[in-house]
Image (spheres, coloured by chain):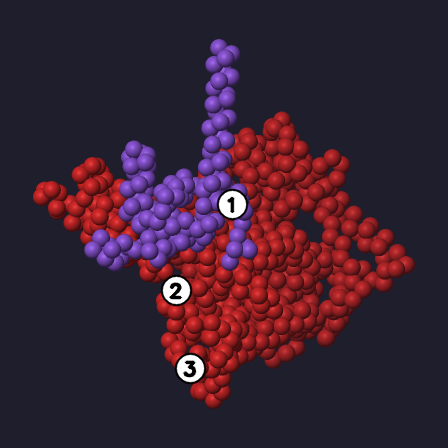
Chain colours: A purple, B red
Amino acid sequence: MHQDQPSPESLLPLKPNWFHVLLSLADGEQHGYGIMQEVLDRTGGKVHLWPATLYGTLKRLLDAELIEESALRPAPEADDARRRYYKLTQFGRRVLAAESQRLEDLVRVIHSKRTLSEAES
Amino acid sequence: MMPAARPVAIGLRLYRALASAFPYEFRNAYADEILQVTEEAIEPIWRRHGILGLARLLLDIALRIPVEYATEFGADIRYGLRMLRASPGFTTVALISLTLGIGVATAAYSELNGFIFRDVPGVRHPDELRLLKEPVSFPDYRSYRERSDLFSGTLAYRAPVPFGVSLGGYTQRTWGHLVTSSYFPTLGVRPALGRVLNADDDKPGRAPVVLVSYRFWTNHLGSDAAAIGKPLIINGQPCTLIGVTPEGFQGASPMVYIADLWLPLSVGPAVAPELADNLLESRDTAVFQVEGRLRSGVSEARAQAALDAMKRQIEAEFSDPDRGLPGRRVVLLPGGKLLPIEKKDTPMFTTFFIVLGGMILLIASSNVANMMLARALERRKEIAVRLALGAGRARLVRQLLTESLLIAAGAGVLGFACAAWLMRAASSENALPYPMPISTNLAPDGRVLLFTLVLTAFAGLAFGLLPALQATRPDLTSALKEGGILRVPRFRRLSMRNLLMVGQMAASLALLLITGFLVMGHRRIANVETGFDPRNLSLVSLDPLRDGVPGDRGAAFFQELLARTRGLPSVAVAGLADTTPMSMIGKPSVPFTVEGGGGMKELHSARPFTVDRDYLEALGVPIVVGRGFRKEDEADGATAVIVSERLVRECWPGGGALGRRIEMGTAAPPPASWEGARTASIWWESLACSRWWEWRGMSETA
């Protein structure tokens, strides 16, 4: 399964939805509604992953083996049987790291440009 | 919270309905979860965004459904391509079979489209135009055109007319129409350059004018706008070029009589010998094609009945010998179609092509369906496993159908390309050995492309659906138990495979028979009993009159030419005639009378050929009874005629052609009277009977 996996860089740049979902799962497993809420909170309500779009994204992330279903479930009284929990795969973690690195580099470039133009003016 | 309950409940119900429309696999895997998330999220969304939030939620799922279907379809295509690549033999044979089927069917439809469905190019509202099936005489046309209550415009033209156009030192034979000035307005054709004819151009004695086609203007006049107003030497006479017709317009009947020149009828016989013998006044020379533009609200049947009644009246008025004959005199055809055929005859043409193309496609499809079935049986194990794992049957059928549609699509592209190439080759102007250019545009257009698309989809479904349904029949256990080796039931009567085989055989046999009959028909036409010997026979066609040589000098020229040709050592015998046998262009049949029983005259008609004394010998036409023409028969006032065997059978069934007499009009009947025509007729004495070919024919000496 893992030998035909592409290199993390080949998936970059990630689609924004993919990045948001991966970022939400970075701290641990999460169910669909949880991911939606997390993204909403983190972006101050700017990014709303609507349910059908969210699950379209989850399906593609599962197909690309960036995430997988988690076997861990919370206590039955806090659980809904229809929920599934998702977590990052090793590969998913590497892809997230690579994308984060790419964005950091980008930000660094923007910063240096800004400093340069400020110095000129 | 309470007032929110109703919109939220409605929204949720709508959302559930939409969620059930997801494709099977996606729905199985995620629909429950999506609904669960939505149930949790809908209240907060309603509180924060109101009705817009609910709308956004519904829009989200509504947009997602087609995306998921497209994804699944894409996966099916990839899977199908992989499966097809895995069995290249099957794929190749199936592709070739279907390409042939679709290609032939498309070519057949393309031909049908080119002949039957296409409109005359360059003409306004072609569906309003009606053409008289039979040509009429000009006086008859004059009567018809009075009926402006039926037609908003009428036109008459004589075609085909060859013109010799002098261009830079040589004469180019160009075909054209001699037209009434109403020709262009009735067809709705505006000039690309200059002007079209107007009523003044109809007046006799005016300086001759001419219009040329865009093609002629480009090819021979160098697209020079300054050519307008300059003279063009036509049949040796200067004619002023007044206009150029729009590009693509080649006359009112471009497929039958293509035209590059249009001259008004007022040019007279000096420019156009076709107008000689007082043609515009002669009631018994029906050579004019007549078209009219029906007024809105006037039915074709009404116009036809009105013209028919007029024709009968004319016949009665002028004591036409045909007046007692039963039957319709005037039949209207669609004048705006390339091939003017009666409406009732259209199905005959279309059915033939459709049956032929359909049958070939049927054979190809059942061939491929049979292979698909065999392949599906091989794959039953795989299919059974997938069914057992919970794949929907519809999903698997769709998967198998995708494969057959892929083959069909490939074959459709190849087949259309083949047909397009074939039809383009057949459309070129000189594809047929014919003395006059015939324009056929059979190249496929949008309509043909649509036909091919439908055909391809149909073929894909036809040969894919049945095997797919059979292969996914849900009797899982047997397929799983057999461990992949499947027994094909051998003696089941009327199984799908048997049916396909029987259908294929039947269609093949029918096609073989049709092809056989076509070949036999072609051979009969190719070996037609011509009555003359075409070996070592050469034809030279000259028209000194159209080169501007006056008539008397022309006759002398021919005598000189003949004498010198006979002097050539390689020439055994040479003769002269006004037209060739079997030519479609030439003099029409003329009426004549013979002496019947009891002193009565019987009316007949036949095509005359004016020939010199060596003509029949040169052609190798045997004289059955009597003698050939001699020098004394060529003298002025000689009345010798040679008749064909067929004419003898028709006129004198008792036999004995020698010495019989026929009464026939001479060249120029006085204007507008049948009686007048009779007084000018003379008696010709038959001196021989020849084995002329099987058309009605007579020969007289020049």
Q: Is residue B606 visible?
A: yes
Among the 4 quarters of the image, the one containing residue B471: bottom left
Residue lying farthest to the front in this orientation = A75
Percent position of residue B316, x then y:
41, 58
Secondary structure at badge 1 equals helix
Q: CA distance from mark 2 to mark 3?
A: 21 Å
Residue lying farthest to the bottom in this orientation = B491
Percent position of residue B345, x then y:
45, 64
Q: Which residue is mark 3?
A: B478
- Left-right relation of B118 to B544: left
- The three-letter amino acid code for the residue at tag 3 is Ser
Residue at 63%, 55% in the rendered image: B425
Quadrant placement of the C terminus of chain B: bottom right
Secondary structure at badge 2 equals helix
- Give the camera-side residue of A38 and A59: A38
- Please determine whether, in this image, residue B587 is positioned above or below residue B232: below
Q: Chain of mark 3?
A: B
Label 2 packing within 10 angstroms: few (<14), some (14-19), many (20+):
some
Residue at 55%, 55% in the rendered image: A3
Residue lying farthest to the left in this orientation = B2
Mark sitting on residue A8 = 1
- The three-letter amino acid code for the residue at tag 1 is Pro
- Give the camera-side residue of A93 and B365: A93
Q: CA distance from mark 3 to mark 1?
A: 46 Å
Label 3 packing within 10 angstroms: few (<14), some (14-19), many (20+):
some
Percent position of residue B648, x then y:
63, 73
Mark sitting on residue B395 = 2
In the rendered image, residues at marks 1 and 2 fall on the same chain = no
- Give the camera-side residue of A105 and B629: A105
Percent position of residue B424, x then y:
61, 53
Residue contact between numbered discs 3 and 1, judged by CB atoms under 8 Å: no
- The three-letter amino acid code for the residue at tag 2 is Arg
